Image (cartoon, rainbow, N blue to C red):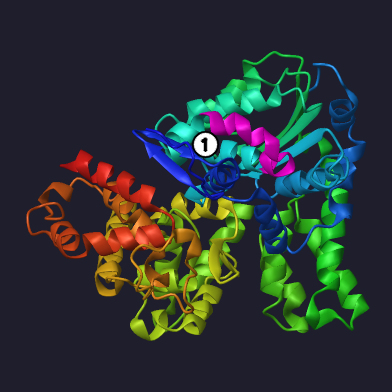
Amino acid sequence: MNIEGNSFGDNATIHQGNVYHYSSEGASDRCLADLRSTDPRDDKVRIEQTKGGLLRELYNWIFENDKFKLWYDDDDAQGQLLWITGDPGKGKTMLACGIIDELADQTRIKTPESKTMLSYFFCQGTDSRINSAVAVLRGLLYLIIQQQPSLILHIRTKYDIAGKSLFEDVNAWTALSQILINILHDASIDSTILVIDVLDECEADQAKLLDFILQHSSLSRVKWVITSRNGPLIEQKLSTYNSRALLSLELKDSEASISDAVNTYIKYSVSRLGVVQDDKALQDDLEKAMQQKVNGTFLWVSLVMKELEQVESWDALQVIDEIPSDLKEVYARMLEQILQLKRGNHKHCIQLLSTACATYRPLSLSEVGFLSGLPRGISEKPGAVRRVVTMCGSFLTIRDENVYLVHQSAKDYLSTEALQTIFPNGVETIHHFLFSRSLQGMSQILRRDAWDLKAPGVLIDEIVAPEPDPLATTRYSCVYWADHLCDGISENWAQTNDLQDDGIIHQFLNKHYLYWLEALSLQRSISYGVVALNRLETLL
């Protein structure tokens, strides 16, 4: 093949066999776009907004903690890894955000001339896009490359051969972990700080990620901050790791500092409560009542405040008196209030809660309304869906038109202690229901040229999604319908006709296969189609 004498634009691509040759600038841009599964900076903003903002007074105690100061000040290979552990709702994520903000000014994130990198990642167990070890590496690498673009050459070495599959195939972890190691050793970087929040919510390949962190925690130019609950796997790994590089900070050993921070949070939250704005005496009474029951848990304060927002001022003290101190008992009370709703609304709430627990990422209002099986009079009206979400108490919250479980501990409670209420016929039944609803929705909506582009050869980067998006309701279904089928397999599954000739899958693929691929390509998720077909093949 001879390409001498030819000129190519910045985004030119030469395909020779299985090797993709991109022009330098265009290839680096494409590589970075393919690497990005999420931007951790956006995740941080979203998390802080969901939690009502970040107050320095709530986390600044950490900077006076002896173990944090040892981690921060020590420049040799000792104390390179600070591991912060604590129970649900104790403020681990808030600490991570605060530490990031404190360090940002000294690193290249905010000071371009600095030779110290800061990268971070927020795991979220309720979202499959950010709850895997590969997702963590992709997020860390993405933020590092954003600070020093020349480091993308470490990725390009393999990306120019493999393309986007480098980040998604079965060897993604192996490739990305080695790339990160190479970057951490790059001579152009003096030091790197890596922060990973709630590592216990990394559900896919958590053990690999744990081993990777512990194996490389003694690198003299790298400092780590990890937050997590004390799960069995984490406890086991840490107990067998005897390196001097590890500094373990258990929040229960800092009860006085956390108690002061929680009391500050109570005072701040009560001051913003509309119904008591003009009653300083009542504000003081509410603060005292909450301080007596809070048990050092920020999440408890947040849940109580959401309930107080719905009552009159003269009922506020009674509400606090009725709310238990224990977080699980708070959840039990919230669920009981839902079950007492009238005119079928409690059933609508259970539908939403079971869907929120069983789906693999937060859903938009239109997605959750349809997938949960709410009546059309509700599901087709975003305002009506929003009202049902509100009826679910503090289990669910809405941010940017997406519905989130308020906390991982809420999902844990609904999926364990409340299992018989949320999943009376088993979790598999809900998964199969979501699979069926997904196929139903896609069959109704998917069609040729769904966005009316009228230009089959248009580049994906040139396409702008229409408003409103006709595929909005099916975005989730296009990606995850096969996963719900696989997770919906039960003892009785063999008697169903899902995969039989002329069954519902056969009919869907026969009539809508190309439309499905088109919809996937429009949302840049064509690789998920390959995964779905591979999973289907394992069932045959």
Q: Residue at x 79, y 82 (%)?
A: 275
Q: To which residue does mark 1 refer?
A: 134
Give the residues in magenta. Answer: 143-157
Is residue 52 visible in the rendered image? The answer is yes
Q: Residue at x 11, y 59 (%)?
A: 503
Q: Quadrant of the C terminus?
A: top left
Tag 1: amino acid: Val
Q: Position of residue 67 (x, y in %)?
A: 85, 28
Look at the image and say whether residue 152 sits in the magenta stretch.
Answer: yes
Q: In this image, 47 relative to 261: left or right?
A: left
Helix, strand or loop for the magenta stretch, by majority: helix
Q: Residue at x 74, y 54 (%)?
A: 298
Mark 1 packing: few (<14 Cα in 10 Å), some, or many (20+)?
Answer: many
Q: Residue at x 80, y 16 (%)?
A: 77
Q: Position of residue 434 (x, y in %)?
A: 32, 61
Q: In this image, 282 relative to 27: left or right?
A: right
Disc 1, SS: helix
Q: Indicate whether 331 appears above or below 138.
A: below
Q: Nearer the viewer, residue 42 or 422?
A: 42
Q: Nearer the viewer, residue 313 or 391?
A: 391
Q: Indicate whether 160 appears above or below 235.
A: below
Q: Indicate whether 294 appears above or below 341.
A: above
Q: Nearer the viewer, residue 34 or 161?
A: 161
Q: Nearer the viewer, residue 399 or 272?
A: 399
